[in-house]
Amino acid sequence: MNKNELVKTWAKRSNLQTGEARKMLNLLLEIMSEKLEKGECIKILNWGHFKPCGQGARWARNPKTGEPHLIKPRIIVKFKTGKRLLKILNAESSRFLS
């Protein structure tokens, strides 16, 4: 699912216009980005939480040339699934395991 599909689904389920749903989604993403940028965690009960983490510099290799390349230190975001979301995902886990 991409952003446009998410907006259309949001609009349909909430009886909103597509433009209003897009504004709401953009606002949610903006708020989440601001909080993560400040180093804050975002916790959504039973669904999961996002946590910004620092990743140090490391060496990697270009797969085509084999040439070593230094990847600069950066901030990444880790997501940990909540209990309810895990339960939902694992209720029909066989579709992913086959």
Image (cartoon, rainbow, N blue to C red):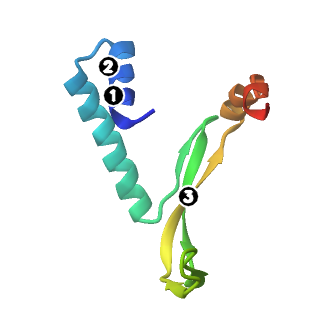
- Reading the image, the residue beneath label 2 is 11
Which of labels 2 and 3 is toward the front? 2
Q: Say whether residue 78 is left or right of residue 20.
A: right
Alpha-carbon distance for marks 1 and 2?
6 Å
- Is 96 above or below relative to 8? below
Alpha-carbon distance for marks 2 and 3?
28 Å
Q: Nearer the viewer, residue 66 or 98?
A: 66
SS for tag 3?
strand
- Reading the image, the residue beneath label 3 is 51
SS for tag 2?
helix
Type of amino acid at the residue the image marks with label 2: Ala
Q: Residue at x 37, y 54 (%)?
A: 33
> Which residue is most to the front?
65
Q: Mark number for residue 7?
A: 1
Q: Say whether residue 30 is left or right of residue 57.
A: left
Kindly check if marks 1 and 2 are in contact, taking CB atoms under 8 A apart as contact: yes
Kindly check if marks 2 and 3 are in contact, taking CB atoms under 8 A apart as contact: no
- Is 74 above or below relative to 79? below
* Quarter of the figure with residue 63: bottom right
Q: Residue at x 52, y 56 (%)?
A: 41
Quadrant of the snapshot with the N terminus: top left
Q: Residue at x 36, y 36 (%)?
A: 3
Type of amino acid at the residue the image marks with label 1: Val
- Is 8 above or below relative to 57? above
Quadrant of the snapshot with the C terminus: top right
Alpha-carbon distance for marks 3 and 1?
25 Å
Residue 7 location (% of width, % of height) = 33, 28
